[in-house]
């Protein structure tokens, strides 16, 4: 590992560890919880109403008052704010953090392991039993193998995913040509080969219109890696980490990304200086892109006639060659090859800081917010996907018709790989290598070899050294 990366790793994990050493509030202070979140203003208004109702419910059940103090902290600032708060012994009891950050905080011993709490033990038989009640991929973001021990350090409080957006107006404009090519203009492609076939009809380079706009960001590329069965990291029983990208599945995934970039139907959106997929979709330059629920309002306000579908799956010949299992085996009959589709998950996870002196009350609050009635309200008022699976049953989505499309995609989605310092992985390791690949300046095999070498040297070796040194 280069010296500056070693310093970055040590500083980040040390700062996380500092969060675990804050002193508890002095005896005699009124009972209360402090909760930090990164919700939008609209979400915050509903959240504060829910908090008020929880306080009233708590008072009625226990005969005691519990003040829940709510503070907004932006997504980007949350981790830094937590570190700053640790210096003044001012950390919250509960923080709703970017799901990607749970691994960093858990490795830094900043978080409470939820199964250690009496409330968790009374509510769930095990981590596996708890998982059955939540959106699986979102729940998995809170599961961390730290030094060989798998623990649950968060519950999902907000979930999101990436799906395929397609412009119905652009499809209708080429309906005759699509039919002549044996394609249905009233539906999007179901696998990657078919996406290229659609794109060849929809693309008109003379006018700068392309069938597809593809991101070069690792986060937006995860759906491809997930559906091709690519594992970025493997932990052994002692917690030692090994890079795992370089195998036949990784090669197949990179070949697919490169094929899309070189197909002539992709508008170069993956280039750092190019028109982004979202902007190109609004400007009707890209007929299809991959993005998430956060863009629905913007696209609707732009007057686009669009729809949302599951991300295309590997074609059948690749499924057979790689022996890929379906991501949704129970839905093979209904979805066909789309049961092999996959995506990633984002959103916020609720963590209990290890420094909190009200851990049981904090867990009870997390349980309340993620309960079925509250999650139904969260969905019906805001169009947010419930994190509790029981809230999906009979859910009225008439105000938010696209919600069910994302819910289908979530059934096949997968968590971000459990890798500390994800920002280093994406910005310093992945981005330079994928640029070279998509420019045709290196092979998939070369990229995977370098990815594994750099992940091992820059991130995983530091984990392994900590285990070898007996660090806690």
Image (cartoon, grey):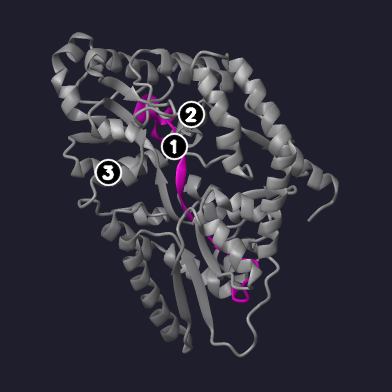
**Residue in the image at 20% along x and 43% along y:** 300
Q: Real-space Cα distance between discs 1 and 2?
A: 9 Å
The N terminus sits in image quarter: top right
Q: Which mark is residue 227?
A: 2
The front one of 55 and 260 is 260
The front one of 119 and 298 is 298
Question: Viewer-nearest of labels 3 and 2?
Answer: 3
Q: Residue under label 1, please give it.
A: 412
Q: Position of residue 148 (x, y in %)?
A: 74, 47
Q: Residue under label 3, please give it.
A: 296
Q: Which mark is residue 163?
A: none
Using a 10 Å C-alpha cutoff, classify the residue at mark 1 as few (fewer than 14 neighbours), some (14 to 19) or many (20 or more).
many
Q: Real-space Cα distance between discs 3 and 1?
A: 21 Å
Q: Position of residue 226 (x, y in %)?
A: 51, 31
Question: Which circle's residue, 3 or 1, is located before the other in the chain?
Answer: 3
Residue 243 visible in the shown view: no
* Residue situated furthest right in the rendering: 469
* Range of magenta residues: 330-358
Question: Would residue 234 be found to the left or right of residue 320 on screen?
Answer: right
Q: Is residue 351 magenta?
A: yes
Q: Position of residue 372 (x, y in %)?
A: 39, 62
Residue 281 visible in the shown view: yes
Q: Are marks 1 and 2 in contact (CB under 8 Å)?
A: yes
**Residue in the image at 55% along x and 14% along y:** 441
Q: Is residue 459 magenta?
A: no
Q: Real-space Cα distance between discs 3 and 2?
A: 24 Å
Q: Are marks 3 and 1 in contact (CB under 8 Å)?
A: no
Q: Give SS at disc 3.
A: helix
Q: Give SS at disc 1.
A: loop
Question: Viewer-nearest of labels 3 and 1?
Answer: 3
Question: Would residue 24 be found to the left or right of residue 159 on screen?
Answer: right
């Amino acid at each position: 590992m280069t010296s500056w990366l070693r310093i970055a790793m040590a500083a980040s994990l040390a700062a996380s560890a500092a969060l675990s050493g804050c002193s508890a509030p002095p005896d005699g202070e009124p009972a209360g919880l402090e909760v930090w979140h990164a919700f939008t203003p609209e979400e915050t208004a509903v959240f504060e109403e829910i908090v008020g109702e929880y306080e009233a419910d708590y008072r009625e059940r226990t005969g005691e008052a519990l003040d829940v103090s709510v503070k907004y902290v932006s997504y980007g600032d949350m981790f830094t704010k937590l570190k700053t708060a640790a210096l003044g012994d001012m950390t919250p009891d509960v923080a709703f953090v970017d799901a990607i950050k749970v691994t960093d905080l858990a490795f830094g011993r900043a978080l409470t392991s939820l199964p250690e709490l009496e409330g968790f033990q009374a509510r769930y038989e095990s981590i596996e039993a708890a998982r059955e009640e939540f959106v699986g991929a979102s729940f998995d973001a809170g599961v961390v193998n730290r030094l060989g021990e798998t623990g649950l350090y968060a519950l999902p409080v907000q979930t999101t995913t990436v799906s395929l957006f397609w412009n119905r107006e652009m499809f209708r404009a080429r309906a005759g040509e699509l039919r002549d090519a044996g394609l249905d203009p009233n539906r999007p492609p179901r696998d990657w080969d078919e996406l290229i076939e659609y794109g060849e009809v929809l693309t008109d380079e003379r006018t700068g219109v392309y069938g597809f706009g593809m991101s070069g960001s690792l986060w937006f590329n995860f759906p491809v890696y997930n559906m091709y069965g690519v594992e970025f990291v493997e932990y052994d029983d002692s917690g030692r980490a090994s890079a795992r990208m370089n195998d036949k599945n990784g090669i197949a995934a990179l070949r697919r990304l490169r094929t899309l970039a070189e197909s002539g139907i992709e508008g170069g959106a993956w280039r750092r200086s190019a028109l982004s997929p979202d902007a190109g979709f609004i400007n009707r330059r890209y007929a299809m892109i991959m993005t998430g629920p956060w863009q629905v309002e913007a696209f609707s306000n732009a007057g686009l006639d669009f729809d949302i579908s599951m991300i295309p799956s590997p074609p059948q010949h690749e499924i057979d060659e790689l022996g890929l299992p379906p991501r949704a085996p129970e839905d093979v009959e209904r979805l066909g090859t789309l049961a092999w589709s996959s995506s990633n998950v984002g959103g916020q996870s609720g963590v209990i800081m290890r420094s909190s002196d009200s851990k049981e009350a904090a867990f009870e609050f997390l349980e309340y917010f993620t309960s079925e009635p509250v999650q139904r309200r969260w969905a019906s008022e805001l169009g947010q996907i419930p994190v509790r699976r029981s809230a999906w049953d009979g859910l009225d989505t008439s105000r938010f018709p696209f919600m069910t499309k994302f819910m289908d995609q979530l059934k096949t989605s997968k968590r971000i790989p459990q890798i500390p310092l994800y920002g280093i992985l994406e910005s310093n390791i992945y981005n330079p290598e994928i640029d070279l690949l998509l420019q045709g300046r290196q092979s998939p095999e070369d990229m995977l070899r370098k990815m594994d070498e750099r992940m091992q040297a820059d991130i995983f070796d530091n984990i392994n050294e900590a285990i070898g040194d007996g660090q806690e």
